[in-house]
Image (cartoon, rainbow, N blue to C red):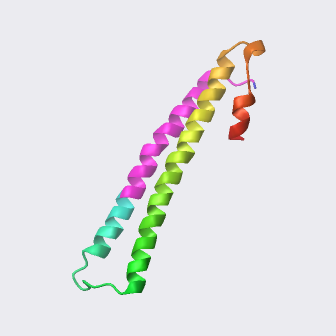
């Protein structure tokens, strides 16, 4: 690898910063949709199908947020680890820990 450690530090920082954007986007959109669905004055009672769709969509929303957290956490760790290894002398570099991220 001929890239500088600073590039990987920047990638790790970027992966961490994208987390904020993802969470704000998903939270804003999903909160608006659930708010409209639950406060609709025309229908106060939901049948079993509507209730199950609402619960299913809420579960998928939570799963998506968890996956985003996990993905960005892994990206940040991977790039940080690569940057730390590139900062060391060639003889002391250990890439075995990076294999788990491939």
Q: Residue at x 76, y 15 (%)?
A: 90
Q: Residue at x 62, y 34 (%)?
A: 78
Left or right of residue 90, residue 40 in this image: left
Residue span colored magenta: 2-27
Q: Residue 82's x, y, as percent? A: 66, 27
Q: Residue at x 65, y 17 (%)?
A: 87
Question: Residue at the left extreme?
Answer: 41
Left or right of residue 43, residue 14 in this image: right
Q: Is residue 78 above or below residue 3?
A: below
Where residue 11 sits, quadrant-wise, is top right
Left or right of residue 26, residue 39 in this image: left
Q: Nearer the viewer, residue 63 or 40?
A: 63
Quarter of the picture holding the N terminus: top right
Where residue 40 sits, quadrant-wise, is bottom left
Q: How many marks?
A: 0
Q: Residue 58's x, y, as percent? A: 41, 67
Question: Residue at the right extreme?
Answer: 91
Q: Residue 64's x, y, as percent? A: 50, 58
Question: Residue at the front extreme?
Answer: 48
Q: Is residue 51 above or below residue 89?
A: below
Residue 33 colored in magenta in the image: no
What is the chief secondary structure element of the magenta stretch?
Answer: helix
Q: Residue 95's x, y, as percent? A: 74, 27
Q: Residue at x 28, y 74 (%)?
A: 38
Q: Is residue 14 above or below residue 59?
A: above
Quarter of the picture holding the C terminus: top right
Where residue 76 sits, quadrant-wise, is top right
């Amino acid at each position: 690898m001929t890239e500088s450690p600073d590039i990987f530090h920047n990638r790790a920082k970027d992966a961490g910063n994208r987390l904020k954007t993802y969470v704000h986007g998903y939270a804003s959109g999903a909160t608006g949709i659930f708010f409209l669905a639950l406060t609709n004055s025309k229908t106060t009672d939901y049948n079993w199908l509507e209730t199950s769709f609402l619960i299913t969509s809420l579960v998928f929303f939570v799963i998506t947020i968890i996956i985003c957290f996990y993905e960005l956490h892994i990206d940040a760790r991977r790039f940080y680890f690569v940057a730390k290894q590139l900062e060391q002398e060639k003889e002391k570099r250990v890439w075995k820990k990076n294999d788990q991220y491939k």
